[in-house]
Image (spheres, rainbow, N blue to C red):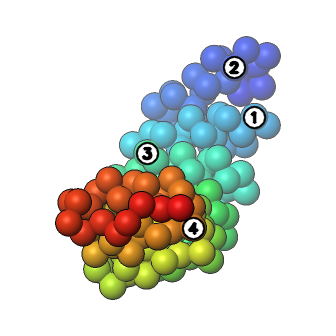
Amino acid sequence: MLAADKHHLVRFAVAENPNPRAWAVALGAADSDVRVILAQRGDLDGETLERLIIAPEREVRVSVVESTDRADVVRRLARDPDVHVRAAAATRPELLSDADLELLAADRIAQVRAVAVQSRRLSPRTVTRLAADRSGNVRYFTLHAHPERLDLAKIMQEDKETDIAELARRRLPPALRDGPRT
């Protein structure tokens, strides 16, 4: 009854209840936000966590990624079919292996690559590849997240997007800059 209450705080309180029987009720709540709140708990049993990992609502799976300290869970969700879940996993590089980060940096969706390139653990070769990505957002975040890579800035000062080219030029000492852009 509380999980169906008209007031959201009452519904959320079901997910915040420390009793595992309440978690089962929260899992079945009509309001998916109750499952989002449940996913933020750090004390869930394996069965409850598994049900959240496979929840049909991406917001629930994103909440799991954002809240867990379990590397196995984040690695698994890094392979989720939903782009938002994979992008959320890329924000947790401390829980991913180098291979997982490389996988996310090669994702077919630019949003995921743009988050993954911000990891300091990607191989130099991968970072170089992402500096030439077809997505301007990926190129921007590559340049922004790796300011020490003057080799990338030298190349990217000629980027077709002027904001990226200008950022690249500002990164370079005057001796390495090409002439002014026209």
Residue 70: x %, y % from top left: 36, 58
Asked whether 143 or 45 is in front, the reply is 143
Q: Spatial distance from mark 2 to mark 1, Cα to Cα?
A: 9 Å
Q: Earlier in the sequence, mark 2 or mark 1?
A: 2
According to the image, label 1 marks what residue?
31
Q: Residues within 10 Å of mark 4 (few under 14, many from 20)?
A: few
Residue 88: x %, y % from top left: 51, 55
Q: Spatial distance from mark 4 to mark 2, Cα to Cα?
A: 48 Å
Asked if the residue under mark 1 is in contact with the one under mark 2, i.e. CB atoms within 8 Å, the reply is yes
Tell me the mark number nearer the camera, choosing from 4 and 2.
4
Asked if the residue under mark 1 is in contact with the one under mark 3, i.e. CB atoms within 8 Å, the reply is no
According to the image, label 2 marks what residue?
8
Residue 171 placement, left or right of 45: left
Q: Quadrant of the N terminus?
A: top right
Per the image, label 4 sits on a secondary structure element best described as loop
Which residue: 43% across, 55% down?
A: 166
Residue 156: x %, y % from top left: 42, 69
Q: Quadrant of residue 8?
A: top right
Which residue: 54% across, 46% down?
A: 63
Q: Amino acid at mark 1?
A: Asp
Q: Amino acid at mark 2?
A: His
Q: Spatial distance from mark 3 to mark 1, Cα to Cα?
A: 19 Å
Residue 3, can we see it?
A: yes
Q: Earlier in the sequence, mark 4 or mark 1?
A: 1
Q: Earlier in the sequence, mark 4 or mark 2?
A: 2
